[in-house]
Image (cartoon, rainbow, N blue to C red):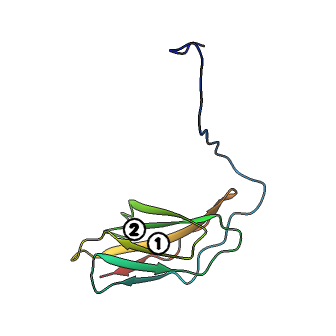
């Protein structure tokens, strides 16, 4: 094995795998509230027992949820980055060291 310098140094290594417990259950009560300033949207949901965090996924079509926001230890969020006249679709999933939950139902916001 060769390295460019005299010594090999690693920092912040993440190892992925599956834990021995259960993955979180599906998120319930996912509420999406587009604000008066249509560039802003607020989210809230019921916390999932055993979840380490949540992924809010969104996009311009139900099959094009290409954007995501990763959140830890919260049950609400506020975003200020939408287009005023675009219709959006949102879903949320919970995760922990054992896996990722099923996605919530997709919410359409005009």
In what element is the residue under mark 2? strand
Is 32 on the left-hand or right-hand side of 46?
left
How far separated are the C-alphas under marks 2 and 1?
6 Å
- Marks 2/1 in contact by CB < 8 Å: the verdict is yes
Quadrant in the picture for residue 3? top right
- Picture disc at residue 5: none
| Towards the viewer: 61 or 37 | 37
Q: In this figure, which residue is indicated by the disc labeled 1? A: 91
- Crowd band around label 1 with a 10 angstrom C-alpha radius: few (<14), some (14–19), many (20+): many
Task: Return the x and y of residue 89 as percentages of the image width and height.
Answer: 37, 73
Q: Earlier in the sequence, mark 2 or mark 1?
A: 2
- Crowd band around label 2 with a 10 angstrom C-alpha radius: few (<14), some (14–19), many (20+): many
Quadrant in the picture for residue 39? bottom left
**Which residue is depicted at the point 27% across and 80% down?**
38
Q: In this figure, which residue is indicated by the disc labeled 2? A: 58
Quarter of the C terminus within the rendering: bottom left
Is 50 on the left-hand or right-hand side of 107?
right
| Towards the viewer: 66 or 62 | 66
Is 77 on the left-hand or right-hand side of 25?
left
Quadrant in the picture for residue 85? bottom left
Quarter of the N terminus within the rendering: top right
| Towards the viewer: 39 or 96 | 39
**Which residue is depicted at the point 27% across and 82% down?**
37
Seen from this angle, which residue lies furthest left?
Answer: 85
In what element is the residue under mark 1? strand
Task: Return the x and y of residue 102 as percentages of the image width and height.
Answer: 58, 68
**Which residue is depicted at the point 68% across and 56% down?**
97
Eyeballing the image, is 34 above or below 10? below
**Which residue is depicted at the point 45% across and 63% down?**
69
Task: Return the x and y of residue 5 as percentages of the image width and height.
Answer: 53, 14
Eyeballing the image, is 81 above or below 76? above
Is 25 on the left-hand or right-hand side of 74?
right
């Amino acid at each position: 094995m060769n390295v460019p310098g005299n010594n090999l140094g690693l920092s912040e290594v993440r190892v992925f795998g599956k834990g021995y417990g259960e993955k979180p259950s599906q998120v319930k009560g996912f509420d999406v509230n587009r604000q008066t300033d249509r560039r802003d949207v607020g989210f809230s949901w019921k916390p999932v027992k055993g979840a380490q965090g949540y992924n809010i996924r969104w996009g311009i079509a139900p099959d094009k949820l290409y954007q995501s926001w990763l959140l830890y230890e919260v049950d609400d969020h506020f975003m200020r980055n939408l287009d005023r006249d675009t219709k959006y679709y949102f879903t949320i999933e919970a995760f922990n060291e054992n896996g990722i939950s099923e996605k919530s139902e997709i919410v359409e916001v005009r």
